Image (tube, rainbow, N blue to C red):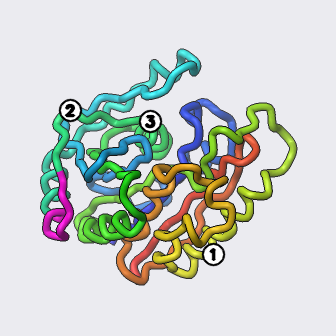
Amino acid sequence: MLPTIFVSHGAPTLPLDDVPARAFLSGLGKTLPRPQAILCVSAHWDTDLPEVGAAERPATVHDFYGFPDALYRMQYPAPGAPGLARRIGELLRTAGLPCEEAADQGLDHGAWCPLLLMYPEADIPVTQVSVQSGRSGQDHLKLGRALQPLSAEGVMILGSGGAVHNLRRLDWRRTGAGPDEFAVAFDDWLERAVVAGDAEAIADFRRRAPHADAAQPSDEHFLPLVVAMGAAGAGARGRRLHHSYTLGNLSMAAFEFAPA
């Protein structure tokens, strides 16, 4: 059984930035069993209903503006996984969830930025499943649990979002000062819930977590974590793999989830 992973991907410049999270991700792939394929659940593919990428050669999507030219020259030419996409569709439909295949879906930066650091050779097939910010945390927990069999089939399930993600409150000039209090309070609550295996609390974070509206003004960057925890199965517990902040309050926390 492969573990399921959640990483915070931060700003699109992560592959260029000299920050602790970049160093962590650059070494993470070497500490994990090598997967046969990767299923990434990224905050940056947000649809009304679940969709799965079925491209044979997914494009590297530069879905951001105003960043250094070097970032737009980066490519992540990993092969796609259309066979895995069909398997994912079967699992979701068996669980009573709709699922459409997106034949031309590329890899958005929530997928390729961390993967470029984790597996720079780009030689592992990759596909994505969308989040649905209009649907509940419970819906995403159910989606994750439907994907659980993949961990025994050589597939790494990688959630990519942000443990704390509020772009309006970032401080781009912040250097030496510590993180903002609201971010620390939310981050600490999240770690306790992950370690305790309290998937219900995490799925209901909007009501249960301190400063949830400040830490996550919208749901899309948190939902990949819910899916990752669900994919480890009922009763799964997690542990924190990494903890750092950038830009004042952008938590770069990462977690690993293992079956009960």
Q: Left or right? Give the position of 71 relative to 133.
A: right
The amino acid beneath tag 3 is His
Residue wearing tag 2 = 104
Report crowding for label 1: few under 14, some 14 to 19, many 20 or more residues within 10 A (C-alpha): some
The location of residue 227, given as percent across then percent down, is 39, 63
The location of residue 25, given as percent across then percent down, is 55, 48
Q: Left or right? Give the position of 136 relative to 201.
A: left
Kindly identify the residue that appears in the image at 30 percent across and 65 percent down. Answer: 143
The amino acid beneath tag 1 is Arg
Give the magenta range: 91-99
Labelled disc at residue 211: none
Kindly identify the residue that appears in the image at 58 percent across and 42 percent down. Answer: 10
Kindly identify the residue that appears in the image at 67 percent across and 47 percent down. Answer: 250
* Nearest to N terminus: mark 1 or mark 3: 3
The location of residue 235, given as percent across then percent down, is 42, 83
The amino acid beneath tag 2 is Asp
Residue wearing tag 1 = 192
Labelled disc at residue 109: 3
In the displayed structure, would residue 253 be above or below residue 81?
below
Q: Helix, strand, or loop for circle 1?
A: helix
The location of residue 83, given as percent across then percent down, is 13, 50
Q: Quadrant of residue 159?
A: bottom left
The question of residue 60 being in magenta is answered with no
In the displayed structure, would residue 60 be above or below residue 228?
above
Report crowding for label 3: few under 14, some 14 to 19, many 20 or more residues within 10 A (C-alpha): many
Quarter occupied by the C terminus: bottom left
Q: Helix, strand, or loop for circle 3?
A: helix
